[in-house]
Image (tube, grey):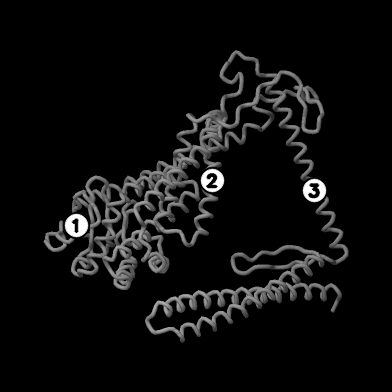
């Protein structure tokens, strides 16, 4: 069993783990960049996050077919030079023989990698089983749900589908009473609406337009593909971060398009969203595109509607977004696939080749580097311990607590460190006080703008929006300064208490 795990770990290093590691760095940078782009349209965030997620399986699958960037070093039969210039020969003092894998215990990392690979495969199988259960649930739900026989909703569905350019026939079904509106089906799409939404014409139009936009964009197919990737790479936390971001952008982009096309007003649509965000007893399948996304907060949807309701994208902008997302997917996938070895090490494929001298040299070099690193770390730790003992003997080491709540931590500091921490907190409090004063002045100026503007005018609405933003900033700065003052007094209290106890006061 250990030999099997070691072989599996060795085979998966370059074929799986290295592409995943490269993708993690690139996709992580992309996620941080997207999080900072507050003005980015949700449809662009939706496509770019999908591109980053789909680049992961593409890079792993393309790794065997793309030329690698890291060719294996040629084997050497004689002595080699170490980093410091010393000559290393393929022998070990005392006559000990090095193992063929590079020294005693060198196969343990490969065994651990093989074990991790097996665990990942088992986790992927479990997640795929859950996805298959969701698909069976949708199939069963479609089979038992009642067809809407009222001609008015069906006629309205055909009219809206024609206006939105949905050419495929869409079936309208009545969902369970405690469910949210949703759509599913790749070739034969279905819109399932509870009876409560069928009785109101305004709510019915909003729901139908929202779900028809999902159908026109083939969101169910994309969601199914996202679920497959999430199941196959369920071990990776960044995959789930991207998955939640995709779900949020998918729904908020639909909200923005519904309002931009003028099918329904912002207030009725917001009331509909508030009604559908009430928790229901009906278990929502993860693969279905629903009006109520579990991971999306109502406040975030309303803010997106406010910012993008009047920004209707042109056909050229939509094509540019799709092409840009495709380019991002290709670049990230190729970068992950290229981070592999160009070829195997000489002799590994030829059982008759004499690899013992070369493997002994490599093993000796690895053992020497590991011994040097262990010795260097031990010397650094001993020096730090000696410094701490010296300060403790002089009574100059203090135990301080910083932070609050779950982020609270305790550390040991010298008197100079305590003074530096207090000075930094004073500087931060002075800066925050200046910012609070400037923000309050801007807040008063914004109030004057609101009072001077005509009622129900564009200038008044813009001034009210500016006032809300400035007021929120002022409150944030005030809470930050209060937190700094509390931390300053806590550090000073701990420092003075320990100092006076040592002096016997």
Give the SS element for disc 3: helix
| Residue corresponding to mark 1 | 173
| Residue corresponding to mark 3 | 380
* Residue in the picture at 74% in, 68% down: 421
| Residue corresponding to mark 2 | 24
Can you say which quadrant of the picture contains the C terminus?
bottom right
Between tags 2 and 3, which lies in front? 2
Task: Tell me the CA gap for discs 1 and 2.
Answer: 42 Å
* Residue 9 in the image: above or below residue 295: above
- Side (left or right) of 327 relative to 283: right
* Residue 418 percent across, percent down from the top left: 77, 68
Task: Tell me the CA gap for discs 1 and 3.
Answer: 70 Å
Q: Are the residues flagged by discs 2 and 3 in contact, CB closer than 8 Å?
A: no
* Residue 89 percent across, percent down from the top left: 78, 23
* Residue 106 in the image: above or below residue 439: above
Label 2 crowd (10 A; few <14 / some 14-19 / many >=20)? many
Looking at the image, is mark 2 or mark 3 earlier in the sequence? 2
Give the SS element for disc 1: strand
Q: Residue furthest top?
A: 352
* Residue in the picture at 32% in, 54% down: 285
Give the SS element for disc 2: helix
* Residue in the picture at 68% in, 30% down: 104
């Amino acid at each position: 069993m250990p030999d099997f795990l070691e072989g599996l770990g060795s085979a998966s290093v370059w074929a799986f783990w290295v592409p995943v590691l490269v993708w993690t760095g690139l996709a992580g940078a992309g996620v941080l960049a997207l999080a900072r782009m507050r003005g980015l349209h949700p449809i662009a965030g939706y496509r770019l996050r999908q591109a980053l997620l789909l680049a992961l399986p593409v890079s792993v699958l393309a790794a065997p077919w793309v030329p690698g960037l890291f060719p294996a070093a040629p084997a050497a039969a004689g002595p080699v030079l170490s980093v410091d210039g010393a000559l290393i020969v393929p022998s070990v003092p005392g006559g000990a023989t090095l193992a063929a894998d590079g020294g005693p215990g060198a196969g343990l990392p490969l065994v651990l990698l093989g074990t991790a690979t097996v665990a990942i495969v088992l986790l992927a199988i479990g997640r795929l089983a859950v996805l298959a259960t969701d698909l069976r649930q949708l199939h069963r739900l479609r089979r038992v749900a009642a067809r809407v026989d009222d001609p008015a909703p069906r006629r309205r569905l055909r009219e809206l589908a024609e206006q939105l350019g949905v050419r495929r026939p869409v079936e309208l079904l009545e969902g369970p009473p405690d469910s949210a509106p949703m759509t599913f089906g790749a070739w034969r799409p279905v819109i399932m609406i509870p009876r409560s939404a069928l009785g109101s014409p305004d709510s019915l139009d909003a729901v139908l337009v929202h779900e028809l936009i999902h159908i026109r964009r083939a969101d169910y197919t994309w969601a199914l593909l996202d679920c497959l990737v999430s199941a196959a790479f369920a071990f990776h936390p960044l995959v789930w971060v991207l998955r939640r971001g995709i779900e949020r952008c998918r729904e908020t982009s639909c909200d923005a398009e519904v309002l931009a096309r003028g099918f329904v007003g912002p207030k009725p649509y917001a009331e509909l969203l508030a009604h559908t965000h009430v928790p229901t007893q009906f278990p929502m399948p993860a693969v279905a595109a629903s009006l109520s996304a579990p991971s999306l907060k109502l406040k975030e949807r309303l803010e997106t509607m406010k910012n993008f309701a009047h920004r209707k994208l042109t056909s050229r902008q939509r094509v540019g977004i799709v092409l840009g997302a495709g380019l991002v997917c290709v670049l990230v996938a190729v970068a992950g696939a290229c981070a592999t070895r160009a070829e195997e090490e000489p002799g590994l494929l030829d059982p008759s080749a004499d690899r013992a001298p070369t493997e002994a040299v490599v093993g000796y070099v690895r053992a020497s580097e590991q011994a040097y690193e262990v010795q260097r770390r031990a010397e650094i730790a001993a020096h730090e311990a000696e410094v701490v003992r010296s300060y403790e003997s002089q009574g100059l080491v203090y135990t301080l607590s910083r932070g609050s709540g779950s982020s609270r931590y305790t550390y040991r500091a010298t008197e100079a460190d305590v003074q530096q921490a207090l000075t930094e907190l004073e500087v931060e409090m002075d800066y925050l006080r200046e910012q609070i004063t400037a923000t309050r002045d801007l807040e008063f100026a914004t109030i004057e703008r609101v009072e001077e503007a005509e009622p129900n005018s564009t200038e008044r609405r813009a001034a009210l929006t500016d006032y809300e933003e400035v007021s929120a900033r002022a409150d944030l700065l005030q809470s930050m300064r209060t937190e700094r003052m509390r931390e300053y007094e806590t550090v000073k209290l701990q420092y003075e208490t320990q100092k006076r106890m040592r002096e016997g006061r």
